[in-house]
Structure formats: C-alpha cells, structure tokens
Image: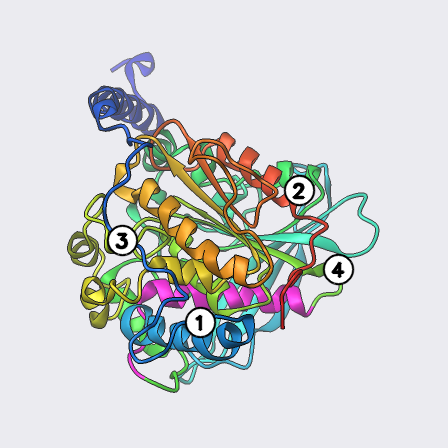
C-alpha cells in the first residue's frame, strides 16, 4: 500500500469526530422543538425559606435566620440529601513548582501546588491545583476557583508534560476524538476554561480536578469516599458532597495565601460541579460569590417541579452522587427544597445560568426558586433577585439569572456573563448589609 493511502490514527479520530458532530447537529435541530418556555409559570408552590419548617416557627428577623433557621437547614440538607461533609482541619499545601507562562501573557505567575488532605486510611489524599496570578495587580487579587472536568493538563491545553490529570479520567476525556466530541456538544470551554481571559480581567484563578479526590464512577467513587475523613454524623457524602468538600479545600489554599483577596473568593461550577459549588457556598462562608451554571436537579432547580430531570432518573444514572437518603428528597421538598439551599448563601452574590434548549436542567424552576430565596436576602437588608424577567439579567443584583440560547454546556457567552457579574460585585464586601 502506498504511503499516501495510509490514514493516521489521528486522521481517523478526526473523521469520527466530524461524523458524530454532524449527527449531533441533526439531533440539535430536532431538539429545537423542546425550547424552554421562559414564560412557564408551573403551578408548583415554592415555600419561602422563612415559612414554618417542621416544628420551627416562621422567621421574622435576621437574628432568628442566622442563629436558628440557617443552621437547621444546613443540617437538614446534609442529613437528607447530600450527606455530612467530612471533618477536616484544612488542606496542607506541599510542593510548589512553576509552570511556563508563554500561553498566558497576562499571568504574573503560574504554579502547580500539591495539596495533602487528611484521610481515614494510612495514606493522605492528594490533589493538585494550578494557581494563576494576574499581572498588574496592586495588592491582593480577587480569585475565581474553577473545578475542571478532564484534569489539569487538559485544562491547560497539554502545555506542560509534567501536569497531573489524576489516576482516573472519564471516557469523554481520554482521547483526542472523545475530547473533540465533548467540546462540540458542550462548548469549547468545557475542557479548557478561559484562564487568560480571567487574568486579563484582573482575576487570579485556582483550578483543580475533583476526580482526583473522588472519581466520577460508582465503584471508584465508593472506594474514594471510604478514604475520606469520617463525618461526625451519618450518612456519609456521595460524590457531589465530596466535590463540595474539595472546593472548600481549594478555598483553604486561597485563605492561606496573602496574594489573594480573601474577601473576594468566587467559585464557578457547571452542571454536577454547579451542584457542588452551591453546596460548598451554602456551608462555607469564606466563599463570597458562586456561579452555578445549569446546575439542574438538586442544584438550583427545585425538586418539587415535574419539569426537567426526574430525581429518580438522576439517582439511577449517577448512583454515586448522593447517599441513598437523597432518593427521598421529593417527599421532603414541601419543606426542604432548593430555594432554601440558595437562601443559605445570602447575603452573598449568586449567578445562576440557564440555556433555552436545556430543559433537563429546568432553568425556569431555578429562576422561581431564586425568587423565593430572595425573601431571605430582603430580611438581611439586601434585595436578592431584581431583574424583570428570566431573560433580562441584572449583574449588579445579589442574585442574577442569565439565560442564553443553546444547549447544556459552557460557551464563551457564559464566561462573558460571569465576568460581568464578578466585575459588578468586585467592590462589594462579602457580608455587606447584614442586619445583626
């Protein structure tokens, strides 16, 4: 056979990716008929987080919220849905090494940090974070923590052969063709966050791969969760709770470093990591802002809605994400639904993202949940959600909802909205306008 007729493995992979992409274009055209109706006012009732909860009387002042109701709700979410997060004294920062910065001209420095976490077994748990610091900053820099989906080396475009991606990667991340299909379906930024864009805007960035702590696969997740420090109460977390715990350990890195502005620590999470980002912010008050992009059921979307992904489908497909008790979340929704999780973040800033073809994530339900959570913001002297409709974001508000055309994923426009939101809140103290 002549050399000219021989196809390389990469050429075959590219051709396969193109074929899959064409098929998905057709599927997307068909799915266009499932566009989210942004005028949907589904009749499900969203109880105010201030309403009576079980035997706890209605909340009428800020002191009762912070001292009585908020601790009760935090405990209930862990006991009934997410599991109790592991006990930990904090992350121990170990080895640091400098990464070449030619791909990031607006970076003052790029470092890989090895982090050691306490473990229930003999060996410590390790994960590696990449820390970017922006040029031209006088004093401490505001920071965005961005969990990535395919490991640090893929997130940085395989620019440094020594970067670690963890012992396990999901199928979508393992080959060039799989990553190409993933980017086509879920957007260019799903694997490579726009670090240079954030640096240019003046933000430091910390990225890490939560799969290093708990892999997103049932058997491996169970083994990894067994190694986590024991919580004080049962049940133990599933993967979503473990990833939230890992986000707080990334906050430990920031909190111990004077180069970061500790009053401006934001977390960006998409989809499953959007669920984890909301939970982390609800339990860790060091987080000043959270961006939860298309976080769906048991994220920002209320369980009491019948539109979107059914809870049974979620727990069947991802049995390792939540403890078994989470399957009863629908029964608890009348008094413990996701508007209360959003409310636990008050008075800090929240950006919720949705997409018109992402009916599965129920953006309308998440918007309505944010409306209900705004009762707590108003109690604390803020406003909460102020925009006139789901499609008219107010980036300066305490809660902003951003809706874009298209499918589930991370596109450039999602980061445009995120940076606009972060810029609008850059001068706002973390606990501004809290009434004691």
Q: Is residue 209 visible?
A: no
The answer for how far apart the CA atoms under marks 2 and 1 are is 33 Å
Q: Is residue 22 above or below residue 434?
A: above
Comes first in the chain, label 3 or label 1: 3
Residue 259 disc label: 4
Q: Could you tell me which quadrant the C terminus lies in?
A: bottom right
State if disc 3 and disc 2 touch (CB < 8 Å): no
Q: What residue is pinned by disc 1?
A: 59
Secondary structure at numbered mark 4: loop
Quick one: SS at disc 2?
helix
Contact between labelled residues 4 and 1, with CB atoms less than 8 Å apart = no
SS at circle 1? loop
As displayed, is residue 99 above or below residue 59? above
In front of the other: 385 or 414 = 385
Separation (CA) of disc 3 from disc 1 = 19 Å
Quarter of the rendering containing residue 78: bottom left
The mark lying in front, picked from 2 and 1, is: 1
Q: Quadrant of residue 32?
A: top left
- What residue is shown with label 2? 423
Q: Residues within 10 Å of mark 2 (few under 14, many from 20)?
A: some
Left or right of 260, for residue 396: left
Q: Is residue 368 visible?
A: yes
Q: Residues within 10 Å of mark 4 (few under 14, many from 20)?
A: some
Specify few, some or many for label 1: CA neighbours under 10 Å numbering under 14, 14-19, or 20 or more.
Answer: some
At which x and y percent is residue 393?
51, 35
CB under 8 Å between discs 4 and 3: no
Q: Residue at x 29, y 52 (%)?
A: 297
Q: In the image, which residues are magenta?
A: 234-256
Q: Position of residue 198 (x, y in %)?
A: 63, 41
As helix, strand or loop, the secondary structure at mark 3 comes to loop
């Amino acid at each position: 056979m002549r050399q000219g007729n021989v196809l390389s493995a990469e050429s075959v992979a590219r051709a396969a990716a193109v074929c899959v992409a064409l098929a998905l274009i057709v599927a997307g055209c068909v799915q266009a008929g499932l566009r989210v109706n942004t005028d949907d006012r589904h009749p499900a009732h969203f109880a105010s987080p201030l309403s009576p909860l079980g035997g706890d009387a209605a909340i009428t002042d800020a002191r009762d919220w912070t001292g009585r109701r908020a601790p009760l709700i935090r405990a209930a979410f862990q006991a009934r849905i997410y599991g109790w997060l592991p006990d930990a004294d904090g992350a121990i920062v170990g080895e640091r090494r400098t990464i070449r910065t030619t791909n990031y001209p607006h970076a003052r420095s790029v470092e890989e940090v090895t982090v050691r976490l306490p473990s229930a077994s003999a060996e410590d748990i390790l994960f590696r974070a990449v820390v970017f610091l922006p040029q031209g900053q006088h004093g401490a820099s505001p920071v965005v923590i961005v969990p990535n989906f395919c490991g640090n080396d893929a997130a940085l475009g395989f620019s440094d052969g020594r970067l670690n991606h963890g012992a396990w990667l999901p199928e979508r991340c393992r080959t060039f063709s799989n990553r190409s299909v993933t980017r086509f379906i879920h957007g260019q930024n799903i694997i490579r966050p726009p670090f240079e864009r954030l640096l240019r805007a003046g933000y430091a960035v910390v990225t890490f791969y939560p799969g290093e702590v708990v892999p997103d696969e049932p058997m491996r997740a169970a083994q990894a969760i067994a190694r986590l420090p024991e919580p004080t109460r049962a049940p133990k977390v599933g993967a979503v709770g473990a990833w939230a715990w890992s986000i707080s350990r990334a906050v430990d890195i920031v909190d111990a470093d004077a180069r970061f502005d500790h009053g401006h620590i934001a977390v960006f999470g998409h989809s499953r990591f959007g669920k984890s980002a909301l939970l982390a912010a609800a339990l860790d008050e060091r987080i000043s802002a959270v961006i939860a992009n298309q976080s769906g059921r048991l994220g920002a979307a209320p369980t009491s809605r019948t539109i979107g992904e059914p809870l049974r489908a979620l727990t069947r497909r991802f049995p390792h994400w939540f403890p078994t008790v989470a399957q009863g979340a629908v029964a608890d929704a009348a008094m413990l639904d996701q508007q209360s999780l959003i409310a636990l973040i008050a008075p800090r800033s929240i950006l919720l993202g949705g997409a018109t073809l992402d009916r599965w994530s129920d953006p309308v339900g998440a918007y309505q949940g944010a409306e209900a959570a705004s009762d707590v913001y108003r109690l604390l002297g803020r406003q909460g959600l102020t925009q006139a409709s789901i499609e008219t974001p107010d980036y300066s508000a305490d809660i902003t909802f951003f809706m874009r055309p298209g499918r589930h994923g991370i596109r450039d426009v999602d980061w445009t909205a995120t940076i606009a939101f972060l810029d609008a809140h850059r001068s706002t103290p973390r606990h501004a306008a809290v009434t004691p």
